[in-house]
Amino acid sequence: MLKILDSDFHRNDDSEDSKEIQSLGEDYPEERPMRFSEESIHAVKDAVHAAFPGQSKVFLFGSRVYDNKRGGDIDLLVVSDLHRSAMESAKIRAVVKIQMALGDQKIDMVVTADPHLDSRPVVREALRNGVEL
């Protein structure tokens, strides 16, 4: 099992949102093969952490987490304690930075503050089958 450490975050505080974000991913299985390079993983994580200050986690989901599936787009779920009013502009900054690092690729990014209360099917799918980067 993967263990989430406080060092995985840029900020460590005791707010309820921060505790919720820290608990995500604790029960995910060990790493699985995926069609996403280490360079791409670092580019995505760097872009997300730069655009979403505070605590954030990023999950890759969709066809890229399976070696046997095809599809070119990059599906990402970002869970952040950033105030909701700032999330859309942070999302745009992150996507632009990822595209600058990886080239012109289709990137679908979904952002949420509370994935356990977010009822969108895409969020449920990302948490169920995604891989935390």
Image (cartoon, rainbow, N blue to C red):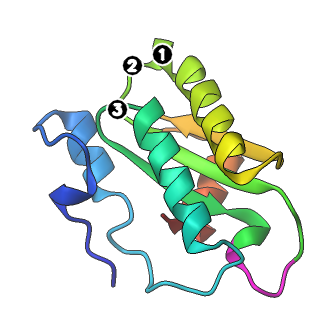
- Dot 1 falls on a residue whose secondary structure is helix
Task: Please give the name of the residue rendered at 48% of the width and 12% of the height, measured from the top-left corner.
Answer: 85
Pick the residue in front: 32 or 116. 32
Picture residue at 33% right of the left edge, 78% below the top: 2
Q: Residue at x 26, y 50 (%)?
A: 9
Task: Tell which circle, 1 or 3, labels the residue nearer the N-terminal end.
Answer: 3
Q: Residues within 10 Å of mark 1 (few under 14, many from 20)?
A: few
Against 87, residue 28 (above or below) is below
> Is the C-beta separation of discs 3 and 2 under 8 Å?
no
Alpha-carbon span between mark 3 and mark 2: 6 Å
Is 90 on the left or on the right of 4, as rendered? right
* Quadrant of res 92: top right
Q: Label for residue 83?
A: 2
Residue 20 visible somewhere in the drawing: yes
- Residue 72 x, y percent position in the rendering: 87, 62
Q: Nearer the viewer, residue 107 or 28?
A: 107
- Residue 60 lies in what quarter of the image? bottom right
Instruction: From the viewer's perspective, tell me whether residue 8 is left or right of residue 103.
Output: left
- Say the numbered circle drawn on residue 103: none
Quadrant where the image shows the N terminus = bottom left
* Residue underneath mark 3: 81
**Which segment is the magenta one?**
65-69
Q: Are marks 1 and 2 in contact (CB under 8 Å)?
A: yes
* Residue 12, quarter of the rendered image: top left
Amino acid on which disc 1 is placed: Ala
- Of the numbered discs in the image, which one, if any, rests on residue 86? 1
Residue 29 horizontal side relative to residue 37, left or right: left
Judge whether residue 113 can be spotted in this image.
no
